[in-house]
Image (tube, grey):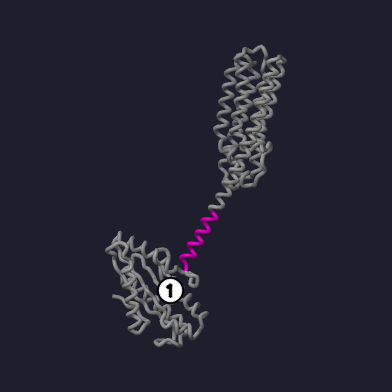
């Protein structure tokens, strides 16, 4: 069913409607100035010069003021302008423009040649149609221009008082109704389109947020809040390819909390969780968070990937981790080697010689971790 009144909408859509009004501002005002020059040229020989010049100066002043308003508006942020103020400013200036254009009909005389009469008719019909494109974004703005022009056009035609004028008035009435209905349809279509657009933008934003959250959840260990095994595998592949292409050393630490099962049995799983979290914090503190990665590989085992790091530098980092864990003095009465919690570390370092063979680095570090544990734990095994 055709709705013959403009749809009500929310503030966000109204803001965009006003922005669209002013977005065409420069070209609309310039076209208006050109049109007024054309009128001046066409009717110079048939209208009293004083009146015509006064009309021309008035319309030029209005267009200059409107151009100034457009310039001011374009300096504003799309989210900071006062909707009501700028909407009303545009509507009022549009109405004034419509009134001034309608006053052109007061110059009309039935003694004019047919070419001048037809030209005036075409000018009126043309600017009414042209205003549709620039003003129907906000329907009231179109009415502000459309009503004075249409009323004056009807007055001009009916004032001739001949049979042809009544027929022409009837056609103009049909044209006016058609333009009104078309403007309403355009306005309401635009409102619906903008509402749909903003709804879709919000859905996309929500979807991106949800995907970001899901990715975080999928790549993050719930307990320690550092990267998990899945995330580590992806990052190791990426890093391996970079180091292969750039012929740079990459290092990897596999870290295991010593006698962790016994720790859980002695102190309980709640304390075991705190222990996991403490070690994770120590790892995070000792790496470069922007280019390295600390991850929980599973259970009491952690993996640290060290970007562009040779074995000597990696050993230094591993030693800091070993000492930091010991310095926390976390009691571990069930440990066979110390009264405090300790870790064992396997260190692997190499310059990749083949793509997609990062498992070699992991296996190297993992094998060395096994040797560190065999050799008494609480130590680092490297080349």
Q: Quadrant of the N terminus?
A: top right
Name of the residue lying farthest toward the left: 353
Give the residues drawn in magenta, as a range. Answer: 205-220
Q: Is residue 151 above or below residue 379?
A: above
Chief SS of the magenta region: helix
Q: Position of residue 250 (x, y in %)?
A: 33, 66
Q: Is residue 356 left or right of residue 286?
A: left
Residue 118 at x, y percent in the picture:
61, 17
Of residues 163 and 330, which is closer to you in this image? Answer: 163
Q: Quadrant of residue 166?
A: top right
Q: Is residue 250 magenta?
A: no
User: With respect to residue 199, does 102 lie above or below?
Assistant: above
On whether residue 209 falls in the magenta region, the answer is yes
Count of numbered circles on the image: 1
100 relative to 89, above or below: above
Residue 39, position in %: x, y?
Answer: 59, 21
- Residue at x 60%, y 47% (from the top left corner): 80
Name which residue lies at 72% across and 15% down.
Answer: 161
Q: Considering depth in this image, is 70 or 116 the residue closer to the camera?
A: 116
- Give the residue drawn at x 30%, y 61%: 355
Q: Badge 1 is on which residue?
A: 298
């Amino acid at each position: 069913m055709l709705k013959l009144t403009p749809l009500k909408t929310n503030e966000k859509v109204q803001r965009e409607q006003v922005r669209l009004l002013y977005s065409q501002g420069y070209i609309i005002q310039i076209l208006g100035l050109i049109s007024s020059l054309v009128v001046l040229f066409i009717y110079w020989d048939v209208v009293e010069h004083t009146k015509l010049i006064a009309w021309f100066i008035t319309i030029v002043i209005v267009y200059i003021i409107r151009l100034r308003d457009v310039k001011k508006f374009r300096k504003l942020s799309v989210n900071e302008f006062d909707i009501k103020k700028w909407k009303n400013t545009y509507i009022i200036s549009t109405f004034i423009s419509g009134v001034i254009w309608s006053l052109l009909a007061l110059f009309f005389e039935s003694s004019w040649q047919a070419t001048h009469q037809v030209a005036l008719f075409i000018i009126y019909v043309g600017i009414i149609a042209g205003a549709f494109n620039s003003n129907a974004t906000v329907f009231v703005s179109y009415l502000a221009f459309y009503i004075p022009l249409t009323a004056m056009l009807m007055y001009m035609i009916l004032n001739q008082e001949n049979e042809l004028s009544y027929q022409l008035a009837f056609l103009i009435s049909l044209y006016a109704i058609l333009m009104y209905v078309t403007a309403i349809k355009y306005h309401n279509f635009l409102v619906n389109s903008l509402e749909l657009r903003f709804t879709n933008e919000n859905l996309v934003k929500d979807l991106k947020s949800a995907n970001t959250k899901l990715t975080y959840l999928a790549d993050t260990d719930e307990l320690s809040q550092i990267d998990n095994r899945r995330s580590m595998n992806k990052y190791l592949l990426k890093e391996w390819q970079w180091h292969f292409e750039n012929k740079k050393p990459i290092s990897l630490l596999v870290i295991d909390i010593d006698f962790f099962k016994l720790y859980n049995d002695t102190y309980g799983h709640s304390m075991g969780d705190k222990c996991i979290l403490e070690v994770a914090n120590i790892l995070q503190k000792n790496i470069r968070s922007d280019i390295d990665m600390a991850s929980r590989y599973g259970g009491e085992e952690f993996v640290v990937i060290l970007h562009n790091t040779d074995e000597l530098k990696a050993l230094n980092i591993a030693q800091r981790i070993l000492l930091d864990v010991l310095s926390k003095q976390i009691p571990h009465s069930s440990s066979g080697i110390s009264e405090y919690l300790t870790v064992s570390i396997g260190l692997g370092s190499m310059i990749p010689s083949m793509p997609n063979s990062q498992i070699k680095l992991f296996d190297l570090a993992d094998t060395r971790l096994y040797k560190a544990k065999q050799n008494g734990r609480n130590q680092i095994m490297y080349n």
